[in-house]
């Protein structure tokens, strides 16, 4: 079977690229290993309950936001994104506070929680939001970083604004530098900050790029959304759009190898079938991607992909719970964080992210019940033998349930159904090597101009997803899919949206 473009993986990035390319009239094939669309934002069912597999909090659906803009370009209606005035509730050792979308309300909440640091926190956020506003302007035209082709450079130059130069002093700084500048480096507020960054940037304030971190901390206030039915709805919408324009979407098709022969790419799936294409787009993590390629292709790509693949990434442990609605505290936020370690640990159950289905969301749970995802970051080296795996799975599960009690004290009496998603389960569902999540941490070593480009250096071979700029999160991977689409259209000298 010959296509113009073969896309490996039916996650958000791949489906975004597929929908845009198909709309422009190209012959597109998407090969997805699982039985679901959406990848890390996919879903699975257990009886009458639907569980989001991973990503749950919707970003970029506000007017002018990334998803709003991309869906509008494709004429896809997506009305079930409900804005959250309270982004999340946060349980910390000193007490409880709420992360508000409204900036002034957010600062007021922080001032109440950290009264002795209130002035310094306000000063810190004033600088953070100033940086974030300039980054938002810069990224408004969706430039690709690092610029590795003339058109990338042209896009970047076109995106420059009068205030862009103010970002230069921050290029070599971390969020930790700003924390120290404002006298907060020994303040308990830093634990709260780290909790926001590790979920979005996969690293804490000490390591996070100041520019990327400031952008992440700014977009929470642009708009956070609950998506009825789960973020898998975005993947489904993109899949429907791609098929509408003629794309061929194949589930349960796992690409095992890719080579180039006589100017065409040849991809072999798990059944030995060969799919050929002028272009191949990989959406899988860079570690998986390199294992697909033969040695000649890897050599042509240079060292950057190999070097990034050697970097350590997080794993996850997720509890998927169906619970009786009666045990949920009144007015509980749909998204919550629980921080249990006074020293600021951010993994192994010390930092939990809770995602609760909304009352009346009958797509996810029948009347009288809700579904609850509880996730934590984990070091994959703790799971590398069967003995360690089996023991730690139970230990971490019990630790996580103990943490959930901070938010839902009656959780144990309300569990109707429970699934444990340890790293190997995540690997089986997503095919991500060793169960890795979140992409490459956005440290100075890996962010912005040190990111991986969506251009591999091999003509016709592209990458999108959370391994390349702009990184993790559904908004980030959607942009990377759009970058690939735009570059392919330019190479083929066709107009793009």
Image (spheres, rainbow, N blue to C red):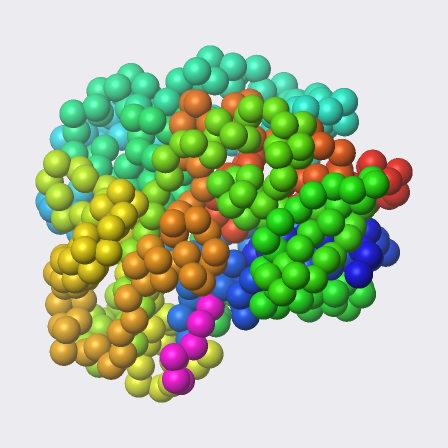
Q: Is residue 277 left or right of residue 211?
A: right
At x 63% / y 65%, what residue is drawn?
271
Residue 157 visible? The answer is yes
Q: Residue at x 22, y 20 (%)?
A: 183
Percent position of residue 282, x then y: 62, 46
Indicate yes or no whether the magenta region holds residue 320: no
When the figure is inspected, residue 179 is found, relative to residue 39, above or below; the finding is above
444 to the left or right of 16: left
The stretch in magenta equals 43-49
User: Residue, x 36% and y 62% (percent of image)?
Assistant: 425
Magenta highlight: main SS = strand
The percent position of residue 453, horizontal first and vertical second, equals: 61, 31
> Looking at the picture, how far across and down is residue 152, in whole percent?
71, 27
Relative depth, front residue between 258 and 470: 258
Residue at image point 67% right, 32% down: 296
Q: Nearer the viewer, residue 324 or 472?
A: 472
Side of 381 where 208 appears, left or right: right
Q: Relative to 135, is 247 above or below?
A: below
């Amino acid at each position: 079977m010959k296509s113009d473009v073969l896309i490996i993986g039916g996650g958000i990035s791949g489906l975004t690229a597929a929908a845009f390319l198909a709309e422009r009239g190209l012959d597109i094939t998407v090969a997805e290993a699982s039985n679901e669309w959406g990848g890390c934002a996919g879903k699975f069912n257990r009886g009458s309950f639907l569980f989001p597999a991973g990503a749950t909090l919707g970003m970029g659906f506000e007017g002018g936001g990334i998803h709003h803009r991309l869906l509008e370009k494709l004429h896809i209606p997506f009305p079930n994104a409900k804005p959250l005035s309270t982004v999340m509730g946060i349980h910390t050792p000193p007490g409880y506070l709420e992360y508000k979308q409204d900036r002034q309300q957010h600062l007021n909440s922080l001032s109440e929680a950290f009264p002795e640091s209130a002035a310094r926190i306000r000063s810190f956020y004033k600088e953070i939001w100033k940086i974030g506003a300039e980054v938002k302007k810069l990224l408004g035209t969706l430039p690709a970083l690092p610029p590795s082709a003339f058109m990338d450079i042209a896009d970047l130059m076109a995106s420059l604004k009068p205030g862009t130069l103010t970002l230069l002093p921050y290029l070599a700084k971390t969020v930790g530098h700003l924390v120290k500048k404002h006298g907060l480096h020994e303040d308990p507020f830093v634990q709260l900050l780290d909790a926001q960054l590790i979920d979005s940037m996969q690293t804490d304030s000490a390591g996070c790029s100041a520019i990327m971190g400031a952008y992440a901390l700014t977009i929470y206030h642009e708009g956070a959304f609950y998506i009825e039915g789960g973020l898998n709805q975005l993947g489904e919408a993109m899949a429907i759009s791609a098929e509408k324009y003629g794309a061929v979407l194949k589930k349960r098709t796992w690409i095992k190898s890719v080579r180039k022969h006589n100017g065409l790419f040849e991809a072999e799936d798990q059944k030995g079938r060969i799919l050929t294409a002028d272009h191949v787009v990989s959406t899988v993590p860079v570690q998986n991607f390199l294992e697909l390629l033969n040695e000649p292709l890897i050599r042509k790509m240079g060292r950057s992909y190999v070097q990034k693949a050697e970097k350590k990434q997080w794993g996850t442990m997720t509890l998927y719970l169906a619970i009786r609605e009666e045990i949920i505290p009144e007015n509980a936020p749909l998204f919550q964080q629980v921080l249990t370690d006074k020293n600021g640990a951010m993994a192994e159950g010390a930092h939990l992210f809770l995602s609760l289905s909304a009352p009346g969301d009958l797509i996810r749970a029948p009347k009288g019940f809700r579904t609850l995802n509880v996730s934590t970051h984990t070091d994959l080296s703790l799971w590398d033998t069967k003995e360690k795996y089996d023991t730690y799975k139970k230990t971490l599960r019990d630790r996580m349930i103990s943490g959930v009690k901070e938010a839902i004290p009656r959780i144990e009496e309300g569990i109707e159904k429970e699934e444990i998603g340890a790293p190997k389960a995540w690997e089986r569902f997503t095919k991500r090597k060793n169960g890795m999540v979140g992409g490459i941490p956005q440290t100075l070593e890996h962010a912005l101009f040190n990111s991986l480009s969506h251009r591999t250096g091999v003509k016709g071979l592209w990458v999108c997803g959370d391994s390349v700029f702009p990184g993790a999160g559904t908004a980030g991977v959607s942009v990377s899919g759009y970058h690939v689409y735009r570059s392919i259209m330019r190479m083929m000298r066709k107009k793009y949206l």
